[in-house]
Image: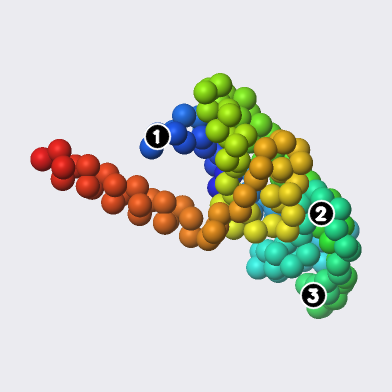
Amino acid sequence: VDIGGGTTEVGIISFGGVVASNTVKAAGDRMDEAIIHFVRKEYNVIIGEPTAELIKMTIGHALVPHAVEQMQVTGRDVVSGLPKTIYLSSTQVQGVLTESLETILEAIRATLETCPPELAGDIVDHGVILTGGGALLKGISEWLTQVIEVPVHLAPEPLQSVAIGTGKSYIVSDRKQKLAK
């Protein structure tokens, strides 16, 4: 499961090929937009995408119980146009992220439902691997493990995993082509 900026891509790979896949437009950017919208609606304060991403990374949590954290955020007051400081809690941010997380969950479930029975046992044994920046959201692997009842693991380098995998795939493909000649 690659939770990137613009999309979340779910794929089941076996013997070097894609067996099933699904893509949804619920990912990091949509989560950031939801935070921006919430802050504007709830506090009449405008914040930018970098601030929203910082909020998500600092006090954002998946749908798991956690100790409540607070964060001071400064933006521009809609009415006066002047800087204004507000305080957000991690439970508020968690609530804002719920819709995107539920969409990601449904994409994972839909993909697993199309999985051939022969591979289902492997997925139960080996689990699901999370990658991409969204995989760094606090508690996401624990939450997904609870709801899909399959072990969910964070990739060793979630931000570089796709690039590393593409490089390895290219090397293997290149070797096969050279052997074929």
| Cα separation between marks 2 and 3 | 19 Å
Q: Residues within 10 Å of mark 2 (few under 14, many from 20)?
A: many
Earlier along the polypeptide chain: callout 2 or callout 3?
3
Q: Report if the CB atoms under discs 2 and 1 are less than 8 Å apart.
A: no
Of the residues shown, which amino acid type is indicated by label 2? Gln
Q: Report if the CB atoms under discs 3 and 1 are less than 8 Å apart.
A: no
Of 150 and 3, nearer the camera is 150
Q: Which mark is residue 15?
A: 1
Q: How crowded is mark 1: few (under 14 residues within 10 Å), some or many (20 or more)?
A: few
Of the residues shown, which amino acid type is indicated by label 3? Thr
Q: Residues within 10 Å of mark 3 (few under 14, many from 20)?
A: some
Left or right, 43 with respect to 171, comes to right
Q: Nearer the viewer, mark 2 or mark 3?
A: 2
**Tag 3 secondary structure:** strand
Q: Name the residue under label 3.
A: 74
Of the residues shown, which amino acid type is indicated by label 1? Phe
Q: In x, y percent, where is residue 105? A: 69, 38
Location of residue 29 by image quarter: bottom right
Q: Nearer the viewer, mark 2 or mark 1?
A: 1
Q: Please identify the residue farthest to the bottom as the structure is shown.
A: 83
Left or right, 13 with respect to 68, comes to left
**Residue 38 can be seen, yes or no:** no
Q: In x, y percent, where is residue 52? A: 71, 64
The image shows a total of numbered marks equal to: 3
